[in-house]
Image: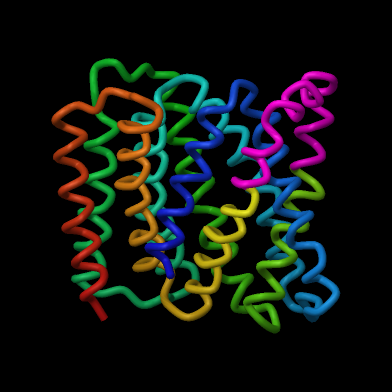
Amino acid sequence: MIVGSGAAHAIVNAVLKSGKDKMSSRALIDGFSALLMFPAAFFLPFPQGAWGWLAGSAVVHLVYLICLIKSFEAADMSVAYPIARGAAPTLAAAVAVTLFNEPINAWIACGIGLVSSGVLLIGSGRSVTRSAIGWAMATGVTIAAYTVIDAQGVRAAPSAQSYIAWIFLMLGGVIGVAFALWRGPRFMLAARSEWRAGLFAGAMSIVTYGLALWAYRLGDTPRLAALRETSIVFATLIAIFVLKERVTAARGAGIAVIALGAAVLLMSK
């Protein structure tokens, strides 16, 4: 589930990166996610016990998306994405273990280290500006924050499906609308040409984060948060063959390190 989530996540971010107006693109993605998930709200219980986690997640996601958009505006996807995703698993693991006493062992720690090292290696390079690194690192911090928050929230809700439905309703209803209003008339112009891509990415957003949240309900956060960062392998392939970005030898080596880390995490118990 978590590897499938990573693959879908890379696709969603490629759609966002390819959009001309990235904030409008993100508004379309989150708005369509909410619309697609809306009918499910009538058949699922309210997420009693998880409202606080949902509110906290919405705030963090707002900051995360602003940082993500800024990082994509400042650098290639093959640079910004790995730096952001590389910082996240180590921070998420540290918080989950220290604050919520989640289990971790030497193998999981080794796998986390390999995945983080690999994605940071991919993101290294002389062409990376300080601004791009700053926004990407800030994105990584917020990823770690919402990962821990949502891992706790989905466990507190009556069911994984309930939390998943409401997280998308909140993100689309609050952040999607806020971004659309922020862009004003420019959002309408972007929507005319990019609504199909937004609809597709919105559906894929449900797949990627729905699978991740369901997995967090079933397993421990440190291992799963790191394993999800295998998305960088898929993102790198998309950057090369779809977005036509140049990938250096160092970034290629980083993919191999990530694959090794993923293998360690899959075999760890």
Q: Which residues are magenta?
A: 176-201
Which quadrant holds the C terminus? bottom left
Q: Is residue 20 left or right of residue 54?
A: left
Q: Position of residue 179 (x, y in %)?
A: 75, 33
Give the prevailing secondary structure in the magenta stretch: helix
Q: Would you say 141 lies left or right of 64 here?
A: left
- Out of 259 and 54, give the one closest to the viewer: 259
19 shown above or below 158: above
Q: Residue at x 80, y 46 (%)?
A: 174
Q: Residue 214 at what x, y percent from top left?
A: 54, 73
Residue at coordinates 57% horizontally, 30% vertically from top-left?
A: 69
Residue 269, compared with residue 189, is above or below; it is below
- For image coordinates 82% across by 67% down, the residue present is 39
Q: Quadrant of residue 250?
A: top left
Question: Is residue 178 highlighted in magenta?
Answer: yes
Please tell me which residue lies in front, 219 or 25.
25
The quadrant of the image that shows the N terminus is: bottom left
Disc tally is 0
Assess whether residue 86 is covered by the magenta stretch.
Answer: no
Q: Quadrant of residue 27?
A: top right
Q: Tell me where residue 232 sits by quadrant.
A: top left
